[in-house]
Image (cartoon, helix red, strand yellow):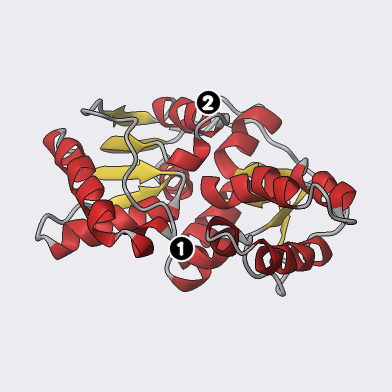
Amino acid sequence: MTSTTPRATGRHVQLMATCLCDAFFDDVAIATVEVLEHLGCTVEFPENQTCCGQPAFNSGDWPASRRVIRHALETFPGEVPVIVPSGSCAAMLFHGAPMEFADQPESARVGALATRVWELSDFVVNSLGVTSWGGRLDARVAFHRSCHTRGTCTGPAVLELLRSIEGLEVLPFGEAEQCCGFGGTFSVAFPHVSSSMGRLKLDHILEAKPDYVVSADMSCLMHLGGLAEKEGRPVQYRHIAQILRDAIRHS
């Protein structure tokens, strides 16, 4: 099948790959670039980028988090969109950062950056206007909606893209809206509660017998995949960028 995906020729974007891409999910960063370039975007990758500041923010260390955000202000200058293949990191930049800088001299600059930050799927659907992806991927998937994407357009955008891919079936499963238990530093502070929540989520997902667990957040995939492997219940998982990229390759 030939993809009829609309183009955004000449659109210039910056990519924030996130710490998880850097440490564990390098293919997600590669897939994100392939997806954006497929849509006609020119992708810039600022090499001195670091973190979104969320670990310190969630731990209550706002001074440390602000130092990270100040670095991001210098790393992602200008007015072009900043694309983040992580609902969690994107939410930190467009929601958490303005909150912690509300009484700081850089408040306006942080606010301006926040308006340019997009989670990948949200950008594809709601900025570029791509609602039908095309391509083909014969697979049954369970979509996990991460907590940080609640109240954003990411979840509906992911589902719209998944359902438009020929051969792909999105499976329902029990308690689909429940947290996976990761919660960033929550999993470190409360490991037993975190693991119990993750096992419950896995129980419901595996009952549906998906080929892949799909999410817009690598942290959730890492948590669920790690638990599954540790307990001898391996499950394959894919970031939405990898699903979109693979559908292009099989079109």
In the displayed structure image, the side of residue 117 where residue 164 appears, left or right: left
Q: Could you tell me which residue is drawn at 90 percent across and 56 percent down?
A: 105
Q: Give me the disc on residue 132.
A: 2
Q: Can you say which quadrant of the picture contains the N terminus? A: top left
Instruction: Assess disc 2: are there few (<14), some (14-19) or many (≥20) residues with their C-alpha within 10 Å of its C-alpha.
Output: some
Q: Is residue 144 visible?
A: yes
- Which mark sits nearer the N-terminus, 2 or 1? 1
Q: Is residue 79 visible?
A: no
The residue pinned by badge 1 equals: 27
Q: Could you tell me which residue is drawn at 46 percent across and 63 percent down?
A: 27
Q: Amino acid at mark 2?
A: Ser
Q: CA distance from mark 2 to mark 1?
A: 23 Å
Q: Amino acid at mark 1?
A: Asp
The local secondary structure at tag 2 comes to loop
Q: Percent x, y for residue 191?
A: 28, 61
Instruction: Assess disc 1: are there few (<14), some (14-19) or many (≥20) residues with their C-alpha within 10 Å of its C-alpha.
Output: some
* As drawn, 242 above or below 204: below
* As drawn, 135 above or below 228: above
Q: Percent x, y for residue 90?
A: 61, 48
In the displayed structure image, the side of residue 107 where residue 239 appears, left or right: left
Seen from the viewer's position, the closer of residues 17 and 98 is 98
Seen from the viewer's position, the closer of residues 17 and 87 is 87
Q: Percent x, y for residue 123?
A: 64, 37
